[in-house]
Image (spheres, coloured by chain):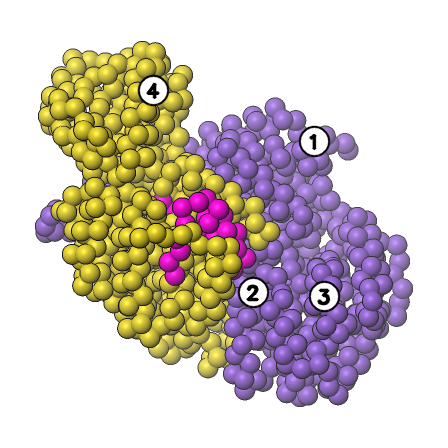
Chain colours: A yellow, B purple
Amino acid sequence: MIYSDATQLEIATCLENASAAFMQFRETSPAQRHQLLRAIAAQLQLARDQLVATAMRETNLPAVRLHNELNRTQFQLESYGAACEKGYWMEASIDVDAAAQPPKPDLRKHLVPLGPVVVFGSSNFPFAYSTAGGDTASALAAGCTVIIKAHPAHLETSILAAACVNRAMEQCQLSPFVFQHVIGNSHQVGEWLVKHPATRAVAFTGSQAGGKQLFDWGAQRSVPIPVFAEMGSVNPVFLLPEKLQQDAAAMAAQLAASFSLGVGQFCTKPGLIIGLESESLQAFVQALQHATWSLQPMPMLHAGIEKAYQLKSKKIVAQPQVELVAESSLPPKEGEGQPLVVKVNASHWLENPLLQEENFGPFTLLVVCKDATEMTAIAQALEGQLTCTVMATQSELSQHKKLMSLLTERCGRLIYNGVPTGVEVCKSMQHGGPYPATTDVRFGAVGEDAIRRFIRPISYQNWPDAQLPLSLQESNPWKIPRFRNGQLE
Amino acid sequence: MIYSDATQLEIATCLENASAAFMQFRETSPAQRHQLLRAIAAQLQLARDQLVATAMRETNLPAVRLHNELNRTQFQLESYGAACEKGYWMEASIDVDAAAQPPKPDLRKHLVPLGPVVVFGSSNFPFAYSTAGGDTASALAAGCTVIIKAHPAHLETSILAAACVNRAMEQCQLSPFVFQHVIGNSHQVGEWLVKHPATRAVAFTGSQAGGKQLFDWGAQRSVPIPVFAEMGSVNPVFLLPEKLQQDAAAMAAQLAASFSLGVGQFCTKPGLIIGLESESLQAFVQALQHATWSLQPMPMLHAGIEKAYQLKSKKIVAQPQVELVAESSLPPKEGEGQPLVVKVNASHWLENPLLQEENFGPFTLLVVCKDATEMTAIAQALEGQLTCTVMATQSELSQHKKLMSLLTERCGRLIYNGVPTGVEVCKSMQHGGPYPATTDVRFGAVGEDAIRRFIRPISYQNWPDAQLPLSLQESNPWKIPRFRNGQLE
């Protein structure tokens, strides 16, 4: 089947419809939005077999992984819907003081949806961060209408998922323009979507170049709009010596499994491991070699990604002082990504920007420091990260305050004695981080607080109770948590 | 006394010091920050007479107004400090489920300060939105260090206020680099401040051109940063016919007082009044004329602002179909702003962009619509506003759903039967709005939620309790409100 890119006129129509539908959709109650998100999850369930089979064909990801990812997608829809209904996100607030002298106005504030949101799905999560994924779920929970730009690498999957969302809209008697699916291979389609005057916000998961381009388009509009782009990171893992001495082998096994998980195609893949030159580090390297030798090359998402991985890996290995430490014993077949571990000294890492970049695929880079000062220098030199991981004993955590302090400034999530892959969907998750991990460190893309990207405050002053939005009426018909004179009721 | 602009080297030193001081200041407890903000308020009190006398000389604002503004400044410091200590803003959240299968990590999230914040004070609020004003108070409450760029129009006042802040820092045994005062007449100083790599956020109150320039610099950095600029608006007031029939004279008196308050130099000044052609509108115009004739021309903030006001007013009056309806009977003396009311038909307003711009000063523009459709067309054409006001009976509010709906999309605060001037400092205040009222509709500049501009989430995964930040430790030593598994404890 041949699909053609949306034209500028089609995109304009799409945004105008999204804008008109928004004026209705923003009036839905949190309970209605919860119902909608549940209905989408149920529709995905009905189409599960077809979705998974299509995604398998388009992304080369295995069935088990895709089933799990679909479960995650449904959980996101359901849990953001439940959070929407609970209503903390609205931050309803009432300030009244009838006795105040001089008199004070009756002021009431809550958070309302921004308007049409354009979502650019990711290539590596065909379900959870694509068409009916986290950005769509949080924008709909906020009360925004959504225009999803299908990822060309899994277009058929996207069309199927969009059909599920459309059926749920119909079931809930909502306008078909609350959620619209746009096809586009060319960057031009993205530019039209971001620059259309009716677009109010953008969410993106993908490469640094792609995310930055959308951010720039958003900022350059005559009316700038927020663009939240999650652009991945190298997710450094710091191995502190005492812990390394205790657990070198176990840590190596854990990290080998993590950097090669999903063919290394997670934005939280540990792509950088930092250790101090020592006997235990040598033991760690040996264990990492053994673990890597027995890893399987697996097919990557698509030919373009595999090619980029191969080229970048070759380029890195060709850098001065970079040593290939291990590769899987099995050579890769066409389209497969080969697990690779390379090693470099801290001084060379520090002076070579290429080594500081993400290499998307089953690849990790071990940086060997001659002392703790070099380790701190690495931390100091790090760009913004989604995650930083510390493998340490508890006493090492307290001894390395400076290092911890530097890492805190450079990431959105700190992990202790674990691996960064595995992004739990819950309120306490922060999936975000300083630039270039994302374009706005103040927001995140996973967990119910992802809703916050798409809402804004509005105050009502001396507004008659009956004409107030329901969330601010004195009787609190939605029974949401509210602040009164600065205290949560 | 002659002050010279900071050099690029001085600014670099300033930001480096701010960055180093931040690593300490961010560790202060909310109670310590509350204490600091109280100490600043107390120091302002000690210097009150000198502050007011100096500001009177520099801004031409009268003593009563300046005393009130200083009270407001102290209230902001104290109330943001209290909110800081209460701790809702940290949104501490814990997700633990020891029984989960498969096991889930222990995840804890809270909001932490961004880092050094550059504040550009306003010309029209020498105290409340300048050196020790709302942006500084909210950035310090967040735990950020502050660099204030003094407004050249009230430099001596700024130096005095900065000295108060410095004394408070000393009293609280904090580094002098937690708060630094920078002098600069040239835009170059602003550019260096925004573009320095250590700067993490910018807050600005002032003109659209100035705010947009800072926003662009922030977005164009190699690491983009958030720039929150509050750039004013025309604050439209819609007069609905039934209400107008009942209260034309009272409404005219109220609006005349509001548009001329503080010589019309408030960003919430009602600069646009929209009514339906009718006998009651004629009565309203007559009453507005009478009220305006008896208004006093008063000295504006400085010669530049007065000159700009005079020029823009002349230009507006010279537009085709624009009619000068009233001016104060007393002509203005040099440097004074003359209260002016002009009138135009809706069709001309709609086609003339100049008439849609803010004219900073004691000026308002009445737009006469021939029917409700034209009134809706005006609402539709409005740019983003800080406020929209509706003068209406309750039944008119429910009859004009479309109009209300349009206004909701176009502002940060909706006022019923009141005036937009007077911005209460409380949690339920939203002082912000869609572009060009501000550069980010998701935030506000007044009330404790202004803190949110300067904070970001960070998660800790499986982190040992003793090494967690105090706000996330199991024993909750700061006794702040916290979410546990999605529910507020």
Q: Quadrant of the C terminus of chain A?
A: bottom left
Mark 1 and mark 2 on one chain: yes
Q: Which is nearer the N-term, disc 1 or disc 2?
A: 1
> What chain does mark 3 sit on?
B
- Residue at which label 1 appears: B5
Task: Please rate how many residues cluster around mark 4, counting C-alpha atoms within 10 Å: few if below 14, some from 14 to 19, many from 20.
Answer: few
**Disc 1 and disc 2 in contact, CB within 8 angstroms:** no
- Residue at which label 2 appears: B410
The label nearer to you, 4 versus 1, is 4
- Span of residues in magenta: A180-205
Q: CA distance from mark 3 to mark 1?
A: 43 Å
Q: Which mark is residue A315?
A: 4
Please indicate, yes or no, whether residue B102 appears anywhere in the rendered image: yes
Task: Return the x and y of residue A385 as percentages of the image width and height.
Answer: 35, 35
Residue at the image position 27 percent from the left and 58 percent from the top: A160
> Any magenta on residue A181?
yes
In the image, B251 versus A68, the foreground residue is: A68
Q: CA distance from mark 4 to mark 3?
A: 59 Å
Mark 4 and mark 3 on one chain: no
Name the element at disc 1.
loop
> Any magenta on residue A240?
no
Q: Amino acid at mark 2?
A: Arg
Q: CA distance from mark 4 to mark 1?
A: 48 Å
Name the element at disc 3.
helix
Residue at the image position 68 percent from the left and 74 percent from the top: B274
- Residue at which label 3 appears: B351
